Image (tube, coloured by chain):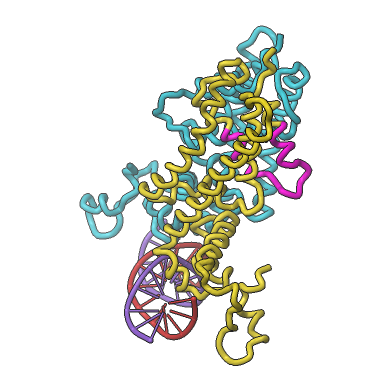
Chain colours: A cyan, B yellow, C red, D purple
Amino acid sequence: MHAIADPATAAPERRTRGRPRKTADERDDGNRRQALLRAAARLFRQQGFAATSTRDIAAAVGMRSGSPFYHFDNKEALLAAVMEEGMARALQHQGEQMAAAVAASATPLTARQCLRVLVRAHFDNLLGPESDHIPVMLYEWRVLSDEQKRAVNRLKDDYEAVWVPVLQALRRDGALGGDPRLARLMLFGALNWAAQWYLPDGRASLDDLTDTTLQLFLKDVP
Amino acid sequence: MHAIADPATAAPERRTRGRPRKTADERDDGNRRQALLRAAARLFRQQGFAATSTRDIAAAVGMRSGSPFYHFDNKEALLAAVMEEGMARALQHQGEQMAAAVAASATPLTARQCLRVLVRAHFDNLLGPESDHIPVMLYEWRVLSDEQKRAVNRLKDDYEAVWVPVLQALRRDGALGGDPRLARLMLFGALNWAAQWYLPDGRASLDDLTDTTLQLFLKDVP
DNA sequence: CCTACCGATCGGTAGG
DNA sequence: CCTACCGATCGGTAGG
């Protein structure tokens, strides 16, 4: 699974005693921190934060048990970093996709078109490749300290802010029903829940999910 | 918080050395098992399964650290019992509410009316008093063994089976859009997500949530 | 259901 | 980033 990760299987190839030498692109270009974040995201998602030991994470990137603490103050800080990185990347992807859609269209986007882009980008962020960070954020939120929550919330607020005018416009058109605040929470619930049941190799593609979402939530406004 | 639960605060009232005597209704009427299930549900929900020690649970009901294992084989079996009890009660509540609605109506219920009853009962099960079991089921599912999952799934299947014909009827009427299977998953997502944000003492009541849900998902069929 | 206990594991650290 | 280590905690058990 991880060629670099397993000192045990690597052992037979040792030229001398001691751990195997790292090749150039494994060395601490500062990408060791990134490797830790990726492994932590994957393990936190699969097993949960509390059930994942820092030793598991270290082993997944070929480190010794104490070494993650060279990069992160403690286990909670590692979790917070996973979430912050996930939200930052999600926010960027959302922005890129919106910008691309605007650029690709000759006319200004309708609210429906905006919603489609946002929902589709959200499914990417939640279910696409390298997307463990966001489910971890959704399901381990309570572990964060208040201060850590504030930091991630700043990004989350930016992320949601893009949706608000789109949903307002749809509501004005009569294409979206219900109390706006509750409706937004329920929409996100419908989307985020997919992290619980969606299988990337399953029958439905992310485009299928997007289609269903719009058909389900938007009313046919005459 | 728990009058019975804290040996430390109870200590001054001891008449002799040793732990305080249990009064009649605290004694093992078989309700000690129930007490463990309730405490476990609350703590598993607040802190998560892995972050809750069996000692925490024992202390919450005034037991010593080893005593929960007199009632349950191990920690996982306690979790499974929490989920099974939660689903069994939810299923019963759903049935009762449907039966009551049928009995209270002079005419057969429309699909819309059925959906309203189901959604409202679901919010009770998810967010009402003594409702920790269901969120625990939703968020600690991966911890169960395959066999434990099967046991709980039998109840979950019964629970969902009640929804299927209602949603089918609404779809035939054109009141519900999207692929039926995906639409059902998204509807449940919208509802279940409320466990993440709903505050019982907040602005919105469970009736408000139900209203918004129907307005959001159902199309005005002419 | 308690007492007394055990082996295992865990987060984290000092010093290099 | 590793070595070597520590104190704390945890799930679980034997015996009553």
Q: Is residue A39 visible?
A: no
Task: List x then y, in percent, for residue A15.
Answer: 22, 53
Q: Identify which residue is drawn at 65% across, 81% down.
A: B10
Residue B104 in the image, given as x and y percentages of width and height? 68, 34
Percent across and percent down for residue A4 are: 34, 46
Q: Is residue B175 left or right of residue B211?
A: left
What is the magenta segment's predominant secondary structure?
helix
Across and down, in percent, residue A110 comes to 69, 14
- The residue at the point 42 percent across, 50 percent down is B144
Q: How many numbered marks, from 0 up?
A: 0
Residue at image x 56%, y 24%? A120
Q: As rendered, which of B176 and A142 lies closer to the eye?
A: B176
Tell me: B140 left or right of B147. Answer: right
User: D12 or A157, which lies in front?
Assistant: D12
Name the quadrant of the C terminus of chain A.
top right
The boundaries of the magenta stretch are B188-211
A66 relative to B145, above or below: below
Image quadrant where one finds the N terminus of chain A: top left
